């Protein structure tokens, strides 16, 4: 779970958070989630092992605005041979108003950026 304060640079001409920025907030929270589980992303890259977003489905529930404090939450809902499937939510801290609901699928890739099985040591950290 991460907290994100909305600044002016996060907003669009209408004064609400620009829709694509939510993808960044979701990525930041997934990264923190993985790190808290003991997955060292820098070490994975050094070992020529990567994750990439395979698919992403977002449902925008309500707009966030300048000054809002958002809470981002990530939950790993499924692990397959080569994929991690996350359910992610963003809501406004004070009112608990839902902002975004998302399902994000990551695929594990080798040094040639070809799908590859998730190493057992990483699976063990995540289960």
Image: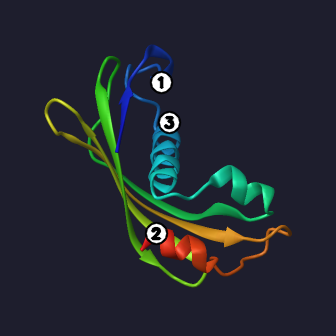
Residue drawn at x 70%, y 59% is: 44
Answer with mark 1 or mark 2, whichever residue precedes in sequence: 1
Image quarter for residue 39?
Answer: bottom right
Characterize the local packing of mark 3: few (<14), some (14-19) or many (20 or more) Cα atoms within 10 angstroms: few
Q: Position of residue 17 (x, y in %)?
A: 41, 29
Residue drawn at x 45%, y 52% is: 36
- Secondary structure at badge 2 equals helix
Residue at image mark 1: 10
Q: Are marks 1 and 2 in contact (CB under 8 Å)?
A: no
CA separation, marks 1 and 2? 32 Å
Residue farthest to the left, as pictured? 95
Answer with mark 2 or mark 3, whichever residue precedes in sequence: 3
Residue drawn at x 61%, y 54% is: 40
- Secondary structure at badge 3 equals helix
> Considering depth in this image, is 123 or 59 the residue closer to the camera?
123
Q: Give the number of the mark in front: 2 or 3.
A: 2
Image quarter for residue 103?
Answer: bottom left
- Secondary structure at badge 1 equals helix
Characterize the local packing of mark 2: few (<14), some (14-19) or many (20 or more) Cα atoms within 10 angstroms: some
CA separation, marks 3 and 1? 7 Å
Q: Give the number of the mark in front: 1 or 2.
A: 2
Q: Position of residue 18 (x, y in %)?
A: 47, 31
The C terminus - image quarter: bottom left
Residue at image mark 2: 126
Residue drawn at x 46%, y 38% is: 19
């Amino acid at each position: 779970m991460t907290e994100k304060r909305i600044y002016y640079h996060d907003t669009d001409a209408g004064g609400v958070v620009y829709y694509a920025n939510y993808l960044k907030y979701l990525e930041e929270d997934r990264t923190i989630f993985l790190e808290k589980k003991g997955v060292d992303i820098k070490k994975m890259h050094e070992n020529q092992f990567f994750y990439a977003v395979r698919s992403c489905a977002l449902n925008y529930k309500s707009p966030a605005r300048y000054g809002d404090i958002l809470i981002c939450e990530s939950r790993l809902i499924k692990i397959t041979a080569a994929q991690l499937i996350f359910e992610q939510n963003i809501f406004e801290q004070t009112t608990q108003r839902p902002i975004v609901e998302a399902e994000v699928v990551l695929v594990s890739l080798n040094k040639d950026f070809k799908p590859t099985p998730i190493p057992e040591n990483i699976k063990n950290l995540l289960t």
